[in-house]
Amino acid sequence: MTRRAYPSDVDDETYHFLLPYLALSAEHAPQRKYLLRDVLNALLWMSRTGAQWEYLPHEFPPPEIVRSQAQRWFAAHCFENAVHDLRLFTRVQQQRGGEPTAIIVDSRTLQSTPESGHRAGYDGAKRRKGTKVHLVVDTLGHLVTLMTSPAHEQDRAQVKDLCREAQAITGGMLEVAFVDQGDTGQATQDAARQSNIELVVVKRSDASRGFVLLPRRWVVERSLAWLSRFRRLGRDLERLSSTLLGFHFVAACVLMLAKIEGAPLTA
């Protein structure tokens, strides 16, 4: 097999860093008809452009090959594991502790499509039918974990699961979670304390008007803005919520690799 060059080709350093996470079988296994790097390039192109699978350019492997391999990667949490290690690397590089002690939580509602409409809900505040993506980041804006729910569910209903998952990922290091006014209430505080996390509600002043930069909360808003640059995440285009989460980890992986570009990624 010979490699083709693509306009969106990942550089050698990035590919060699990701290869151990993505090689679920031997890179040159007999059953492999297309190079792993070509499939990765196709998936990154899909993530950036948000195109339909059938419109994948002919220079890439066939859409059914890329889609089936992407599903295997998502099921094996390949990009999620890469994001976890990249977060550790970046924090140590910036002379922080490997695992955070504080997180920031927020959500956004993605408009549903015919593919995702069967699990959508109506968000009365946003006046939009779709899926809520609940995001947990550290104080540097790096993705820790995320989950989805129908848009009609309240943010506070997800606090318990988000805190438990984030605490497990960070090895029990978390102490504080910064949230918005939608997560107020004693029940929400008690749910977070079950994971030994104290909720700190960052409130907007009643006298303020227009855009206000809220302490701590601007970090997760920035992370959401970064992710929105990937058109695949502009709407909920996926039939399965696991695929939607998978594309979020792909985007987070690309962003973190770009952030530490030039740093040695391999031992």
Image: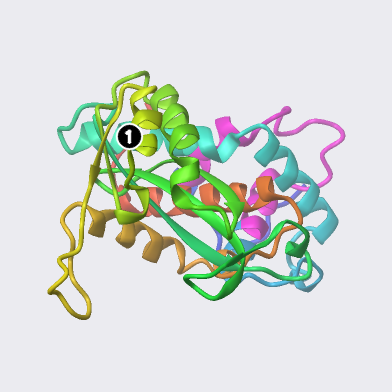
Q: Where is residue 114 in the image (x, y as percent from the top left)?
A: 78, 70
Relative to residue 235, is residue 107 drawn left or right? left
Residue 242 sits in which quadrant?
top right
Q: For this rendering, which residue is in front, 108 or 152?
A: 152
Q: Which residue lies furthest to the bottom in this view?
A: 210
Q: Which of 18 and 202 is in front in this view?
A: 202
- Residue 52, x across and y down, in percent: 74, 70
Q: In this view, does 164 lie to the left or right of 51?
A: left
Amino acid type, mark 1? Gln
Q: Look at the image and name its color scheme.
A: rainbow
* Residue 109 on image: x %, y %: 52, 64
Where, by quadrant of the figure, is residue 222 drawn?
bottom left
Residue 15 lies in magenta, yes or no? Answer: yes
Residue at the disc numbered 1:
189
Residue at the image position 85 percent from the left and 32 percent from the top: 30
Residue 230 seen in render: yes
The residue drawn where x is 33% and y is 37% is 186
Foreground: 88 or 101? Answer: 101
Classify residue 199 as left or right of residue 129. left
The residue segment tinted magenta is 14-43
